[in-house]
Amino acid sequence: MAWIDVCFSATGVLDFPILFGVHTVIMNTLRWIRAFLFFALAAIAPALCAQAAQSQPEFIQPGAVWLDTQGHQIQAHGGGVLYHDHVWYWFGEDRTQGLDPDKRYVACYSSRDLIHWTFRGRPLQLADPDRIGSGWVLERPKVFYSRSTRQFVMYFHLDDSAYKVARVATAISSTPTGPYRYVRSFRPLGLESRDIGQFEDDDGSDYLIFESRPSGGFYIAELSSDRLSVARQVAFLDLALEGGAVVHYRDLYYVLGSHLTGWNPNPNVYSSAPSLTGPWTQFLPVAPAVPDTYGAQSGLLLKITGDRNTAVIFMGDIWNPSKLWDSRYLWMPVQVGEGKMALPPPAPWTIDVTTGVVTVNPKEQIAKITK
Ligand code: DGJ
């Protein structure tokens, strides 16, 4: 062995006691180094992973697999976003494969820049709360914050496998990331309710948007101050739309929704009004250049008010019904103003949430979103 060459005493004669003494010392030292490296690596591995995630492109890529900061595909389908204490919380249906088939799961992610999202667990893991039966449905969770009770209230669409129950359900928590405790289910304003959406106005009032099939339209309804109930109807829009979303931009309100085509995309439409109560303009397609809204279904319009610009982001789902877990997201800033709204062709984009300035990289326009 090579180390024997250096193990001579001063006389130049091989000295066995020295040899074995030095050998033991070296072997022990090597063991210590190995143990040290092992523990050091274990200690810094999470930081390395986080850094790897952070060093992902700083662009949001509509339609691509979107990884959280731990490198897992984000599961927040049909989601909603709550902004609280300078953090955005993204809640959505967690369709991860292999979970308990009798339960339904809501996942939560948080971000300070809208680009990097950290998984904050599953704040709601629910077993059929109203004994609806197998195939029961939990969809489109949305979380509101009540300033009066300091509680977070989650709403979601609760249904049976045939979508005949048509109710909303609520769950509460004292922290945004849960765990949430189931409260009850009900029909808002006594009406059938399927897809729900959320809207917080600039004055802090919160609204539930819900599609109601028997009336052939959808409602915007204000929530009570404790957010636990639907207090009053604000508007009824006479068009059967789901995936409903509302934003207040400058002096107008905009409402956006999709037609009722199940999981399949269709031309999403928008309308505007000077007040939530209307009068609402005729609905027009938000992406007239394509027949299917680039494969996406509306879900939320998020307003980011920076110190230089106010951006409005279309947050939609690109559903993959045969692999719901691999459904993707189409988040894209819209062109909005003077009663018009346009969803541009999907392209990588980024936002500085301090200034509100959005940068779209149209050179890398995503021509076709692949599932
Ligand atoms: C369309 C809705 O927007 C989705 O949330 C889901 O309910 C599907 N329909 C089910 O077909």
Image (spheres, grey):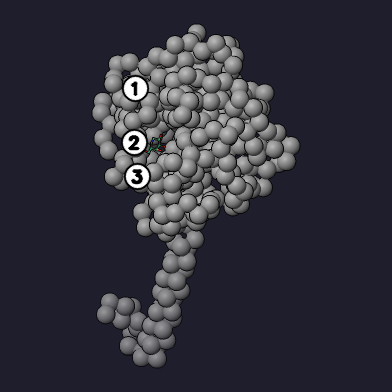
> In the rendered image, is residue 283 in sight?
yes
Q: Residues within 10 Å of mark 2 (few under 14, many from 20)?
A: some
Disc 3 and disc 2 in contact, CB within 8 angstroms: no
Amino acid type at image mark 3? Leu
Q: Which residue is under mark 2?
A: 263
Q: Which residue is under mark 1?
A: 267
Q: Residues within 10 Å of mark 3 (few under 14, many from 20)?
A: some
> In the rendered image, is residue 353 in sight?
no
Secondary structure of the residue carrying numbered label 1: loop
Q: Nearer the viewer, mark 3 or mark 2?
A: 2
Q: Quadrant of the N terminus?
A: bottom left
Outermost residue, bottom direction? Answer: 17
Amino acid type at image mark 2? Trp
Amino acid type at image mark 1? Pro
Near-viewer residue (349 or 258): 258
- CA gap, disc 3 and disc 2: 10 Å
Which numbered circle lies on residue 324? 3
- Mark 3 or mark 2, which has the lower sequence index? 2
Which numbered circle lies on residue 197? none
Near-viewer residue (184 or 53): 184
Residue at point 28%, 77% (across, down): 2
- CA gap, disc 2 and disc 1: 13 Å
> Residue 201: x and y, percent?
61, 24
